[in-house]
Image (cartoon, helix red, strand yellow):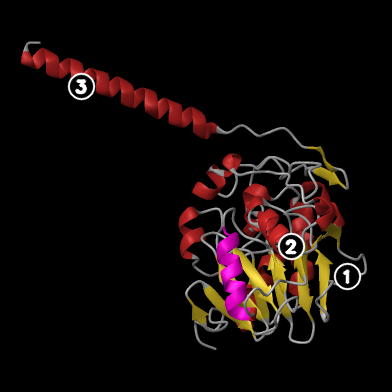
Amino acid sequence: MGDNAGQEVGARRGAVQVVAADLACLAQPIVNVYFVGPPGAGDRGWVLVDAGLPGSDGQITRVAEERFGLAARPAAIVLTHGHFDHVGALPELAEQWDAPVYAQELELPYLTGRSAYAPPDPTVGGGAMARLSPLYPRGPIDLGARARALPADGRVPELPGWRAMHTPGHSPGHVSLFREADRVLIAGDAFVTTKQESAIAALAKPQAVHGPPAYFTHDWGAARRSVEALAALRPEVAATGHGWPMRGERLQQELQTLARDFAHLAVPAHGRYVDQPAVMDERGVVSVPPPVPDPLPAVLAGVGAVAAAAGAALVALRRRNSGG
């Protein structure tokens, strides 16, 4: 297989990529949205997986109509998890389409107004996306009665042939969707195919298998077990929450490597949740470990103070030289 074997999954048109005959990926600037159903499926003949960035409901609706037909609403919306970049357009879409929203039971507190997620850790992963993470919304949103728990037996409503696997770590109720017939995996953020902590990588999407986005991962032990379980599936295609979908031998090799060397490749050397995970249950966040020392603000303050002093000295020198 050539160097591009893990990259080209299907035809792209703009930000939309065909992943399988009945699966399309809409790539938003830092996150992906997935449409499951055959082209032309019509009203209630398809399912939306995740709901992208805030303000993107118009874009998602346009892609849905282009793929499935004018005014075609989904039979359901299924969430891999409820982080802000996966539910940004959800309140508007769920209302507009009058569609039920399914998520794993442990995600429901963040979708029904009960709890915000545990704080991010900006000290892990490096890069601007990680550093900016304290500014990202932690929720909750409140979908009311539209939010429903996925069946405990792994069935996915309105998606026959798919099963939901509980893959926690990045969030407590994170799920990945797998179809055994063609070994297509919608992995969410259990692992991703770009280095999401870097703003440049998040936008440019250089392709390689990486662990879950570190700044929002609150249980590294669970995250490792989830990657191991997904690697054991040997997926033919992985459609992830961040980065272009991958397929084939390269995907499988890199995913196996990530599972084997997860502690080295994915887990930060230090961080708020590295030694002690956040505790979250059906009520939401129960407890979180204390934040770790972060030298960057002090460093930036010191740099700013030095720059200000240097500027003042330069002004004084100019005045003295000019006789002012």
Earlier in the chain: of badge 2 and badge 1, it is 2
Above or below, 198 against 232 in this view is above
Amino acid type, residue under disc 2 in the picture: Thr
Per the image, label 3 sits on a secondary structure element best described as helix
What is the spatial separation of the Cα atoms under label 3 and label 2, in whole angstroms? 55 Å
- The quarter of the image holding the C terminus is top left
**Residue 247 at least partly seen:** no
Q: Which residue is mark 1?
A: 154
Q: Is residue 63 left or right of residue 156?
A: left
**Residue 176 at least partly seen:** yes
Mark 1: give few (<14), some (14-19) or many (20+) Cα within 10 Å: some
> x and y percent of residue 143 in the render?
77, 51
> x and y percent of residue 63 in the render?
58, 72
Q: At x 69% / y 40%, what residue is drawn?
A: 119
Image quarter of residue 323: top left
> x and y percent of residue 84 in the render?
65, 51
What is the spatial separation of the Cα atoms under label 2 and label 1, in whole angstroms? 13 Å
> x and y percent of residue 253 in the render?
64, 77
State the extent of the magenta-drawn residues as a range.
Answer: 56-67
Above or below, 286 against 301 in this view is below
Amino acid type, residue under disc 1 in the picture: Gly
Per the image, label 1 sits on a secondary structure element best described as loop
Badge number at residue 314: 3
